Amino acid sequence: MNDVLDDLFEVIEDRKETLPEDSYTASLFTHEKGENAVLEKLGEEMTELILAAKDDDREEMAYEGADVIYHLLVLLSMKDMEPADLRAELESRR
């Protein structure tokens, strides 16, 4: 059974393949900066998550945390990895 991360990853993979013109996700794959575009976004979103945590703003933490996870999934896709790779690593740490 798929969960929300797997479903989102499938959408990301589809956008990478089809590159719709109006897709933010597709624009990350075709950005002139290459993978640096998603790396910069990931850093930006992490900073925003940290600031939200510092302010004890749970709503903002959820919002920024979702942005972090989304951009991490895009990065995984760029590197030909998938959520299962993260799950396996986390499982090995139990």
Image (spheres, rainbow, N blue to C red):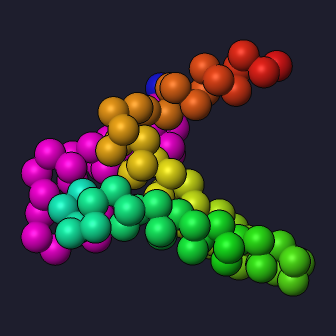
User: Which residue corresponds to the image point at 52% horizontal and 26% vertical from the top-left?
Assistant: 85
Q: Which residues are magenta?
A: 2-28
Q: Main secondary structure of the magenta part?
A: helix
Image quarter of residue 30 = bottom left
User: Which residue corresponds to the image point at 77% horizontal and 78% vertical from the top-left?
Assistant: 52
Side of 78 where 55 appears, left or right: right
Of residues 84 and 40, the one drawn nearer to the viewer in this rendering:
40
Relative to 18, is 33 above or below? below
| Residue 5: in magenta span | yes
Image quarter of residue 64 = bottom right
User: Which residue corresponds to the image point at 16% horizontal and 74% vertical from the top-left?
Assistant: 22
Residue 71 point in image, percent of width and height: 47, 58
Image quarter of residue 10 = top left
Residue 12 seen by the camera: yes
| Residue 21: in magenta span | yes
Residue 58 seen by the camera: no
Q: Which quarter shows the C terminus?
A: top right
Side of 55 where 30 appears, left or right: left
User: Which residue corresponds to the image point at 77% horizontal and 79% vertical from the top-left?
Assistant: 51
Of residues 38 and 54, the one drawn nearer to the viewer in this rendering:
38
Side of 6 where 59 appears, left or right: right
Of residues 70 and 34, the one drawn nearer to the viewer in this rendering:
34
Residue 56 point in image, percent of width and height: 89, 78
Q: Determine the residue located farthest toward the top in the rendered image.
A: 92
Residue 93 point in image, percent of width and height: 78, 21
User: What is the count of numbered marks?
Assistant: 0
